[in-house]
Image (cartoon, rainbow, N blue to C red):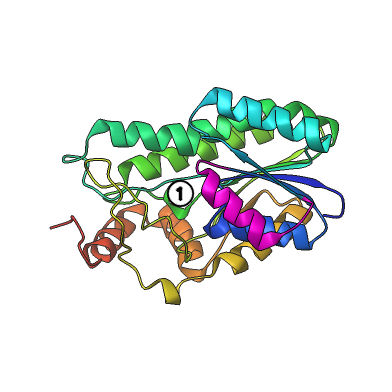
């Protein structure tokens, strides 16, 4: 990572923040965007590094993504690695959810990836770099009460797989990462059926894989130019069963999510 320029969307908390700090420790120059200037300022104070550049941007807006990428290239000269990490989740049955919630998830999780990749791609091609999408096991297996989340992650992975194939002989690498259940803020900020943050997590966050462990695994995978990275034993098993026994997995997944505290499944 020495002297590489790493761009991370949604880099003020969870996996994104851990990736930013790990990249800085590895010798990279890091550019991070986030929607809230105060969280970006807090990251700057915590890290206190001249190699960190922050920019306020909402990745659901194409112009924000365009200006962010342009500013990174103007200030840092290039982009070697783009990590599309910005994302939001949901928890509500499809029959109950307002469709605006699904649009919001697609705008952030899918279109945010598309926008940033579009404008960063010329520099990444010039430097034979890497495009990364932080996806989810929900990108391999549709999860109940998370129709918008699963849809956005399936779309992200389809986009990245197409992009990877298009660029098979250009020298760049395109990969996607599926962390499994990770201790982060994504469940607290997950949207309910009305589009409001649920402000709580149904999981015991202390028993989940840490964001720092995920970041270390992601950076190693980037250095090895891997195609995909699936983390946690549960995640790997879910991906395998979804391929071999999809019908059986329907019942397993339903029962698993039905047991969540406050589950909308009846």
* Quarter of the image that includes the C terminus: bottom left
* Quarter of the image that includes the N terminus: bottom right
Residue 247: image x %, image y %? 30, 54
| Residue identified by numbered label 1 | 140
Q: Is residue 224 visible?
A: no
The residue under the point 83% across, 58% down is: 27
The residue under the point 28% across, 54% down is: 198
Q: Is residue 17 left or right of residue 111?
A: right
Residue 73: image x %, image y %? 78, 32
Magenta segment's dominant SS is helix
- Per the rendered image, the range of residues in magenta is 34-51
Is residue 50 found inside the magenta-colored segment of the image? Answer: yes
Residue that sits furthest to the top in the current view: 63
Q: Dot 1: within a 10 Å radius of its alpha carbon, few (fewer than 14), some, or many (20 or more) residues? A: many
Residue that sits furthest to the left in the current view: 266
Is residue 266 found inside the magenta-colored segment of the image? Answer: no
Q: Is residue 70 left or right of residue 155?
A: right
Q: Nearer the viewer, residue 163 or 113?
A: 113
Q: Nearer the viewer, residue 210 or 218?
A: 210
The residue under the point 18% across, 55% down is: 264
């Amino acid at each position: 990572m020495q002297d590489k320029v790493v761009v991370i969307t949604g880099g003020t908390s969870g996996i994104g923040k851990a990736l930013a700090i790990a990249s800085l420790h590895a010798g990279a120059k890091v550019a991070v965007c986030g929607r809230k200037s105060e969280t970006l300022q807090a990251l700057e104070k915590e890290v206190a590094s001249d190699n960190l550049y922050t920019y306020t941007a909402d990745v659901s807006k194409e112009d924000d993504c365009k200006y962010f990428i342009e500013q990174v290239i103007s200030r840092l000269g290039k982009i070697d690695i783009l990590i599309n990490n910005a994302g939001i989740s949901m928890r509500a049955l499809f029959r109950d959810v307002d469709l605006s919630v699904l649009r919001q998830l697609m705008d952030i999780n899918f279109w945010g990836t598309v926008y940033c990749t579009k404008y960063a791609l010329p520099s990444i091609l010039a430097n034979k770099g890497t495009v990364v999408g932080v996806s989810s096991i929900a990108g391999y297996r549709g999860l109940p009460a998370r129709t918008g989340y699963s849809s956005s992650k399936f779309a992200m992975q389809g986009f990245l797989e197409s992009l990877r194939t298009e660029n098979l002989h250009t020298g760049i690498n395109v990969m996607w990462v599926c962390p499994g259940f990770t201790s982060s803020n994504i469940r607290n900020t997950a949207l309910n059926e009305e589009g409001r943050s649920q402000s709580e997590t149904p999981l015991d966050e202390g028993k989940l894989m840490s964001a720092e462990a995920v970041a270390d695994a992601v950076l190693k995978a980037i250095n090895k130019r891997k195609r995909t990275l699936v983390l946690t034993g549960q995640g790997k098993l879910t991906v395998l069963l979804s391929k071999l026994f999809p019908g059986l997995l329907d019942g397993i997944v339903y029962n698993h999510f039905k047991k969540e505290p406050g589950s909308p499944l009846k």
